[in-house]
Amino acid sequence: MRGVVLQRPGNAFQRANFSSAELDQSTLEAGAGSFQLACFDNSSIKNAQLIGGGASFQVASFDSADLSGTSLEGNFQLASFQNAVLRDSTLHGSFQGCDISGADFSGADLTGINRNSLESCYFSVPPAFSSETIFPPGFSPGIQGWQRSPPPQ
């Protein structure tokens, strides 16, 4: 499904299973309650756009997905990003109570996430960030227990 454009109004793609899908350079866009409980585990979603409305992506799973260079916009409340790769991605919306264990945010732009929302995320393995990662004002990754990744060799 590389390069596909899926646009639906309303509450589309709830409980959809996109696990192990190749969605590189795709656009997935839907309305208010879209993508709730959707599964994107082990998917390749590089340089794509995932766009949802106010209650979108709640309890969605992106475990071990590669979201490098992707733009994510929506309400990712209670979503799981365990071991996800979000290098050079851009995130907008809410990340309240997300599991970000082992996620890689190197070079990501996180300024579109409210600091308090990002502080509510939890992890068992610290998420990684780089000197190029951009955080919301007032967010201190070191204080929150994030791990700085070594510079590329």
Image (spheres, helix red, strand yellow):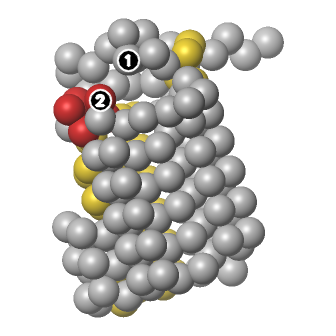
Residue under label 2, please give it.
119
Evaluate if marks 2 and 1 touch, with contact meaning CB atoms under 8 Å apart: yes
> Observer-nearest residue: 80 or 87?
80
Q: Amino acid at mark 2?
A: Glu
- Which residue is found at the position 42% from the left and 10% from the top? 142
Residue under label 1, please give it.
144
Q: Position of residue 68 (x, y in %)?
A: 60, 46
How packed is label 2: few (under 14 Cα within 10 Å), some, or many (20 or more)?
some
- Which residue is found at the position 24% from the left and 39% from the top? 117
Left or right side of 80 for 14: left
Q: Is residue 85 visible?
A: no
Q: Is residue 114 visible?
A: yes
Q: Position of residue 34 (x, y in %)?
A: 34, 78
Left or right side of 39 for 66: right
- Which residue is found at the position 60% from the left and 79% from the top? 17
**Element class at badge 1:** loop
The image quadrant that residue 144 belongs to is: top left
Quarter of the rendering occupied by the C terminus: top right
Label 2, label 1: how far apart the Cα atoms are: 7 Å
